[in-house]
Amino acid sequence: MKTENYFTTLSQIDCTEHLEKKGKFSYLSWAWAVKRLREVAPTATWHVKRFDGVPYLKTDCGFFVEVEVTVQGLPLSQIHPILNNQNKPIAEPNSFDINTSIQRCLVKAIALHGLGLYIYAGEDLPEVPEKQISPQQIGAIKVNIKKLATLRKVDEDTIKAHLSISDIKELTYTQAENILKKSSKWVVTAQKEQEVLSETNPASAHSSVESA
């Protein structure tokens, strides 16, 4: 990993799925943040600053903690007030409050190196391009449409309408997956219905399928 690239690498990681909600505020999981940081920068270290031997600073305006994260020799520190879940200062924090604030401070210090920085910058979550339909999905959907049209004795456009398809190639990967599952179930159902009709009344099976 090149020194000049680590910030870019970290800042481009999508953290959306690892945000935790507390009250009306969102936080990035500290355990996941540390894991991703170490995956990108294995030699990264962090240090919780002590104030007269304790991991917090008491001032006239509240309690604070400070964490320093070093990546490739570059130390960056973050100071964080000890807050509750409503982001209000805690007048008399206990050990749990202090530990929670240290974890939040650690995540913010890591963000200074790029990971999840957009969250604290108030920016929108990065857009992740929707995965497009694959050739295999297109082929499988076409096969199911043809089977259903044959089994139900209707044209393929009718089947497409029931599946809400205007243009198969314009579907996203997720949409195609859902349509493929639905159409596959329909095919199985139609085949079973035809088999039952054939067993109970072979002579009228053909005409019954036409009216299905």
Image: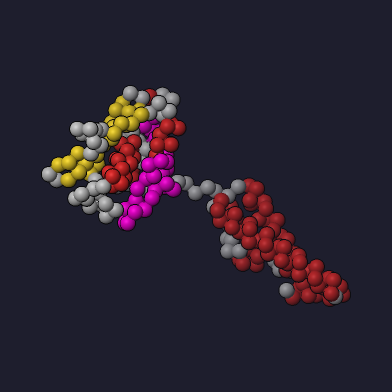
Looking at the picture, tell me which residue is in the foreground, 13 or 104.
104
State which region is magenta: 5-32
Which quadrant is home to the C terminus? bottom right
How many numbered marks have been drawn onto this rendered protein structure? Answer: 0
Q: Position of residue 1 (x, y in %)?
A: 43, 25
**Camera sees residue 12:** no
Residue drawn where x is 76% and y is 65% of the image: 191
Give the farthest residue toward the right: 203
Vertical comparison of 35 with 179: above or below: above
Looking at the picture, tell me which residue is in the foreground, 127 or 7.
7
Judge from the rendering whether residue 94 lies leftward or rightward of residue 35; answer left or right: left
Q: Position of residue 110 (x, y in %)?
A: 34, 36
Residue drawn where x is 34% and y is 54% of the image: 22
Q: Position of residue 133 (x, y in %)?
A: 58, 49
Q: Is residue 7 magenta?
A: yes
Q: Is residue 156 magenta?
A: no
